[in-house]
Amino acid sequence: MDLHTIESIETPRTRADLTGLSATDGLLSGGTWLMSEPQMHLRRLIDLRGLDWPDLTVTEQGLEIAATCTIERLIAAEYPPEWRATPVFSAAARALVASFKIWKNASVGGNICLGFPAGAMISMTSALDAVLLVWKADGSDQRLSVPEFVVAQNQTALEPGDVLRSIMIPASALTQPTTLRKMAMSPLGRSGVVVIGRREPAGALISVTAATRVPFVISTKSMEPDEVAAQVDSAIPPQAYYSDAHGAADWRRHVTGVLTRDVVVELAGS
Ligand SMILES: Cc1cc2nc3c(=O)[nH]c(=O)nc-3n(C[C@H](O)[C@H](O)[C@H](O)COP(=O)(O)OP(=O)(O)OC[C@H]3O[C@@H](n4cnc5c(N)ncnc54)[C@H](O)[C@@H]3O)c2cc1C
């Protein structure tokens, strides 16, 4: 849609060009959400794609994903064969119910910066111990985990002028097998509950998203399905679950337990 309040579009080339951004500047990545509804508070768009960050950088330390990397590019790329966790990129992306226009243009960073409970890239990165690098408006750097970054429903730790630069996923997480379960109210419905499990050397890591307002990550030494489900249930306060058109809070809590058991059973055999 046309954004009638926008007076100019700037294309930064370096970090210095990002100096002085304010709350009336909209950071444009894929633009799929920015262009989907009126943005009455915005006067300028800052097209981050002009910074030309390399989409994906594979190193011994892990995978660095530029915030502007599209979700399509992330799931189409090839990765080292020992990175057994990478199928979760595609599994999480498929939990994002979207038209082909969103699928091709939406960026990993744009998805995370919205802070939606059902943010597909929030689910994926929270399960893989990702570290988010934020370029603060004052010129400093800040590194946050995903649960630290998503502070409330649709709200992140970003302050006006802050830019999410990249997402670093450590090799230690990428080498571990993962599995994802999603439940929605209809076959093509938006995720009501997403549970991702990652096998750790002793036990598993469980991430819960979509069911709760913010992501929850629980590490357990147990691989006994009922025990892990009980640990997850006690780690998430009942009021963290929420009700909307995609599911009631008590349904979300119950299904989180069901999917957690399922994930643990599968991980135990991996
Ligand atoms: C009809 C519809 C249905 C959708 N359903 C789902 C769904 O089920 N699950 C789901 O996960 N998503 C859903 N989405 C959201 C979709 O995933 C987002 O539109 C997309 O992920 C946003 O990515 P983008 O790159 O296009 O971001 P943009 O639209 O460019 O930006 C999104 C927001 O993030 C800010 N931003 C972007 N990049 C940065 C950065 N690097 N640093 C700081 N701030 C930044 C922007 O200023 C803006 O506020 C839906 C969207 C629509 C329109």
Image (tube, rainbow, N blue to C red):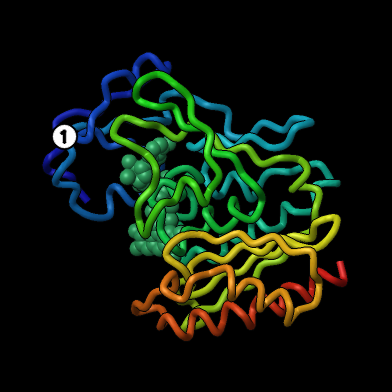
| Residue closer to the observer: 104 or 200 | 200
Mark count: 1
Quadrant of the drawing holding the C terminus = bottom right
**Residue at the spot 75% in from the left edge and 32% down from the top edge:** 61
| Mark 1 nearby-residue class (10 Å; few <14, some 14–19, many ≥20) | some
Q: Nearer the viewer, residue 136 or 52?
A: 136
Identify which residue, 48 or 159, lies in the foreground. Answer: 159
Q: Is residue 115 above or below residue 47?
A: below
Q: Is residue 252 above or below residue 22?
A: below
Residue 60 x, y percent position in the rendering: 79, 31
Q: Is residue 206 shown left or right of residue 27?
A: right
Residue 101 seen by the camera: no
Task: Find disc 1 in the rendering and name its residue.
Answer: 43
Residue 159 x, y percent position in the rendering: 32, 36
Left or right relative to 98: residue 161: left
Image point (35%, 21%), residue name: 138
User: In terms of image quadrants, where is residue 219?
Assistant: bottom right
Residue shown at 67% from the left, 77% from the top: 229
Residue 149 is at least partly visible in this image: yes
Q: Relative to 193, is 230 on the left or the right?
A: right
Callout 1: SS: loop
Q: Position of residue 103 (x, y in %)?
A: 48, 55
Q: Amino acid at mark 1?
A: Arg
Does the beta carbon at disc 1 come under 8 Å from ligand 1? no
Percent position of residue 142, x then y: 49, 30
Compared with 61, 200 (above or below) is below
